[in-house]
Amino acid sequence: MGRVFLTGVTGFVGRYVAARLLARPDVEGLDVLVRARDEAHARERLLDSMTHAVSPDDAPELVARMTPIIGDLRRDRFGLDEEAWHALAGRTTHVLHGAANVRFDQDLEDARSYNVFGTEQAALLAREAKGRGGLDRFDWVGTAFVAGLRRDRVLESELEHAAGWKNPYEQSKYEAEQWLRAHAADLPLTVFRPSIVVGDSSTGATTNFGMLYWPIRLYAKGWWRTVVGSAETPVDIVPVDFVADAIDALSQPGQPVGATYHLTSGVEGAVTIGALAQLAQDFFGGRPARFADPDFFMTWVRPVVDLFIWGPKRRVLRQGGRFFIPYMSGNPLFDNTETTAALAAHGVEVPQVREYFSNLLAYAKSTDFGKKPAETPPA
């Protein structure tokens, strides 16, 4: 049996991945990186995180099989002393690095301190584990949006481009993947690139109400129905349970290493902003969305909005618009041909957006977009 070192377990995707890893017979337990004051605080954070991925009755048993590694992505060797670092490397057979700072409003150096330097430390641990003869896999969770401002079809084999990025998060993840390609070629590295991750396809459950949820919240509350972008802009979203299922399936013993997988809806599965707006209108029963050219809006309309809209509505508009509008004006299409073929062998399919989108909206409505507790816990 193997032991997995997992980062990101207190994050949205990481908690779902942890639950799947602990259900596998080949996984003895998890060493999980957690920022905490002490072990008691670490276990408190882990329990809180896991209750969002599994039933609250099941969460304590899963947390009991986790060993908290109190540390920080931004510190050398995650802040561990030499003895703890060597002990961790000596028992690690699988490094799965999923932690990242995903905020769009951070400055570039701050993003790099988490996403690039943290990746370097994960690779350092993987290399030491390999040197001790115990490493089978090093899996790294990036993002499909390393494609940045590209608006064409992006292949799984592609990385390098000069198109630029929408925000420091994208750029830092691009630089981290570049660093891995240049400095971790000797490791059994596999790269997973999810697109926009939304709630569970069955329950709609999520703790992340940014990105796609921002304009939907505005529309649902009747505050705003103007989309600053094009109705034809493609949007690639995937539910968190699919992402976790895919990472679990493609990281099991005997799976090949060295591939790059697009955990995306793909060229055929991506939907348009206009289609999502229609689905939201059908669910909430509001008026049709309007679409505005971004340059015209920011030059002529935005100053008027700032003058006449106040209170929570203005705050939500200003907070989200600066960071999310670029994703409504143009996006790449992510080819997932190789991933789809690999997942088919495990019976894992990419869910179609129209099959689960109403579940996302129902959960968002029932929790007032995260302002109220869920009526029923995740299954």
Image: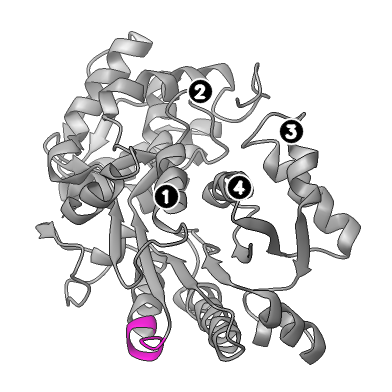
**Residue 256, relative to residue 317: is it above or below?**
below
How far apart are the alpha carbons under marks 2 and 4? 16 Å
Front disc: 1 or 3: 1
User: Tag 4 or tag 1, which sits nearer the N-term?
Assistant: 4
* Residue receiving disc 2: 203
Which quadrant of the figure has residue 312?
Answer: top right
Q: Nearer the viewer, residue 28 or 320?
A: 28
Q: What label sits on residue 15 in the rendered view? A: 4
Q: Position of residue 144 (x, y in %)?
A: 30, 59
Front disc: 2 or 1: 1
Front disc: 4 or 3: 3
Q: What label sits on residue 165 in the rendered view? A: none
Residue at 59% from the left image edge and 59% from the top image edge: 8
Residue 299 visible to the viewer? no
- Give the structural element (helix, strand or loop) at label 3: loop
- Give the structural element (helix, strand or loop) at label 2: loop
The N terminus lies in which quarter of the figure?
A: bottom right
User: Tag 3 or tag 1, which sits nearer the N-term?
Assistant: 3
* Residue receiving disc 3: 58
**Residue 2, relative to residue 365: is it above or below?**
below
Q: Is 355 colored magenta in this rendering?
A: no
